[in-house]
Image (cartoon, rainbow, N blue to C red):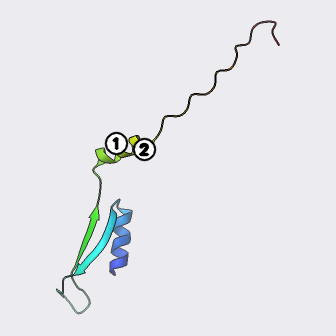
Amino acid sequence: MPGKDFLALMLKAGFHRVALVRYTGFKSSPYTEGALFYGEKLAAGQARDDLASQTEPAPTPPKEAACEPGGT
């Protein structure tokens, strides 16, 4: 699997700041080479906290004048 494809899988799995750091030089066959990848993934609680801190409360709608019987 080419490095770019593996990076795309890491992004799809929820990692961010992904990178192919370097190739190790280890070849387990004529078609494969070892590589070091880096990625960061937030813990489930951190993701919720970060999302909650980014959302602003919805503004309160303006109050409408109450209708009084016989009023226009």
What percent of the width, then of the height, locates residue 57? 49, 34
* Three-letter amino acid code at the position of disc 1: Asp
* Three-letter amino acid code at the position of disc 2: Gln
Label 1, label 2: how far apart the Cα atoms are: 9 Å
Callout 1 secondary element: helix
Q: Residues within 10 Å of mark 1 (few under 14, many from 20)?
A: few
What percent of the width, then of the height, locates residue 24? 18, 82
In the image, which is nearer the foreground, mark 1 or mark 2? 2
Where is residue 41, by image quadrant? bottom left
Q: Residues within 10 Å of mark 2 (few under 14, many from 20)?
A: few
Tell me the residue at 57%/28% (across/down).
60
Q: Residue furthest top?
A: 69
Tell me the residue at 81%/6% (across/down).
70
Tell me the residue at 34%/48% (across/down).
47
- Tell me if residue 37 comes above or below residue 67 in the rendering: below
What percent of the width, then of the height, locates residue 10? 33, 66
What residue sits right under mark 2 in the picture? 54
Tell me the residue at 38%/70% (across/down).
8
Callout 2 secondary element: helix
Q: Residue furthest bottom?
A: 30
What residue sits right under mark 1 in the picture? 49
Please report whichever mark, 1 or 2, sits nearer to the chain's N-terminal start: 1
Instruction: Say if mark 1 contacts mark 2, CB within 8 Å.
Output: no
